[in-house]
């Protein structure tokens, strides 16, 4: 079939397998162009492995240090005449390329919040790898069914105390407008968001993996967070999502104590603002990212998810020195270039004057759009989108 992008709001309803393949190859080529991570992980579990930072983490581990990887995710498989989700095609591409390079790579498709998927993962580790020495937690979901109680929680994206009004952009039309978001009405909305996006499930994973004996001596685990600039604080860091991120970060000392007898350690990495399926849904953020992209590209310090994750692995988690550089609150900061004073000063200056009329001149809205469509395998250089494409693509380890 000929596959074209079909968009509804901040979601693309279609995905292109050949575009996904080329995207994955591009990320692999980037990692291979860098120096091998000599002290890198060898057996890695990535929870939330099919898109964004999770996918780039898996690629960085496999092609940066030759790691065997298991990926866990929840994606829709294709059938004749029906497309898969982008994450399915990404994973099919990753596994194919990893197997070509002689590396172990298997995947589990299911609800990572569930006890059943946790057990499937443990069984696979025991059978094939014995133990893992790195666990990456990169889940992004708007909903979670609690595995112990069966209660279904839904997260909300709201400020907490006052309504928040600021600029935003429709990145499809290029219209800059003001948006107002009302604050939470009930404490329950905050707690539900923490239940979905906080640290409890990460803790459940590490507890179950440890109890099963599949965590290696010296194991590391890392989860991902974001802080951002003050202009997004009301809707992000000081909003409901920020409360969940606080909970995630507060899980680190709990996991450090849990892993103490293994000589293990846990970290939260604060990453850069990038175009992801999650960030596209947050008002204000697409406009901020469009400005940020322009400023950072002009300074020669722009990074995508693969550049971020390669730097996280090579310069932080597995640095030659053996020391993991942390901020005053014990976090890894891979948002360090984004939060540079000169970068943020320029972003703030542009923010004050940006409008629909000058959007194309003072921001990189075109780069934002391109990155958005590339999440789904579109607008990737080297792919002929006028050609018929087989939509039924298998993930080797799931369909074997």
Image (spheres, grey):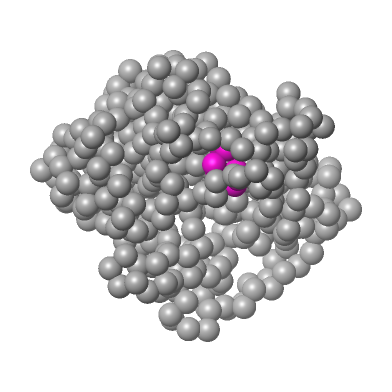
Residue visible at 34% across and 38% down in the picture: 45
Query: Residue at 53% across / 70% down in the picture?
Result: 156
Residue ID at (37%, 74%): 151
Q: Is residue 87 above or below residue 303?
A: below
Q: Residue furthest front?
A: 80
Q: In the picture, residue 342 is in which quadrant?
A: top right
Residue 244, placed above or below residue 54: below
**Residue nearest the viewer, comparing 366 with 375:** 375
Q: Quadrant of the C terminus?
A: top left
Does 209 appear in magenta? no
In the rendering, at what x and y percent does residue 388 appear? 76, 32
User: Which quadrant would the N terminus be assigned to in this image?
Assistant: top right
Q: Which residues are magenta?
A: 84-90
Residue drawn at x 74%, y 53% is 7
- Count of marks placed on residues: 0
Residue 155 spot, x, y in % from top left: 49, 68
Q: Is residue 219 left or right of residue 383?
A: left
In the displayed structure image, the side of residue 269 where residue 378 appears, left or right: right
Q: Residue furthest right?
A: 357
Give whichever of 223, 353 is nearer the camera. 223
Q: Position of residue 233 (x, y in %)?
A: 55, 62
Residue 178 in picture, x, y percent from top left: 76, 67
The answer to which image quadrant residue 11 occupies is bottom right
């Amino acid at each position: 079939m000929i596959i074209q992008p079909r968009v509804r709001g901040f979601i693309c309803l279609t995905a292109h397998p050949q575009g996904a393949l080329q995207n994955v190859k591009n990320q692999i080529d980037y990692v291979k162009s860098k120096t091998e991570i000599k002290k890198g992980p060898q057996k890695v579990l990535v929870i939330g492995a099919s898109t964004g930072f999770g996918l780039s983490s898996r690629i960085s581990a496999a092609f940066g240090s030759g790691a065997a990887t298991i990926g866990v995710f929840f994606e829709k498989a294709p059938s004749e005449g029906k497309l898969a989700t982008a994450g399915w095609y990404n994973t099919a591409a990753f596994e194919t390329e990893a197997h070509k390079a002689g590396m172990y790579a298997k995947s589990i498709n299911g609800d990572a919040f569930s006890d059943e998927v946790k057990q499937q993962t443990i069984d696979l580790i025991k059978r094939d790898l014995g133990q893992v020495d790195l666990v990456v937690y990169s889940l992004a979901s708007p909903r979670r069914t609690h595995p112990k109680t069966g209660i279904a929680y839904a997260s909300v994206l709201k400020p907490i105390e006052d309504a928040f009004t600021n600029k935003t952009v429709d990145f499809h039309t290029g219209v800059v407008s003001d948006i107002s978001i009302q604050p939470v009405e009930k404490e329950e909305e905050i707690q539900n968001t923490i239940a979905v996006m906080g640290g409890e499930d990460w803790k459940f994973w590490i507890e179950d993996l440890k109890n099963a004996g599949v965590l290696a001596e010296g194991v590391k685990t890392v989860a991902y967070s974001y802080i951002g600039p003050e202009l997004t604080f009301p809707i992000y860091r000081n909003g409901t999502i920020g409360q969940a991120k606080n909970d995630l970060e507060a899980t680190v000392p709990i996991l450090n104590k849990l892993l103490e007898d293994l000589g293990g350690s846990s970290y939260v990495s604060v990453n850069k603002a990038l175009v992801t399926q999650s960030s596209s849904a947050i008002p204000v953020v697409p406009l901020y990212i469009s400005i940020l992209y322009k400023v950072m590209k002009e300074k020669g310090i722009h990074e995508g998810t693969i550049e971020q994750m390669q730097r996280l692995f090579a310069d932080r988690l597995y640095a030659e020195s053996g020391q993991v550089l942390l901020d005053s609150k014990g976090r890894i900061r891979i948002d360090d270039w984004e939060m540079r004073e000169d970068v943020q000063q320029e972003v703030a200056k542009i923010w004050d004057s940006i409008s629909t009329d000058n959007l194309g001149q003072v921001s990189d809205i075109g780069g934002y759009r391109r990155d958005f469509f590339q999440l789904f395998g579109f607008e990737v250089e080297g792919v002929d989108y006028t050609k018929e494409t087989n939509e039924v693509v298998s993930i080797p380890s799931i369909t074997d």
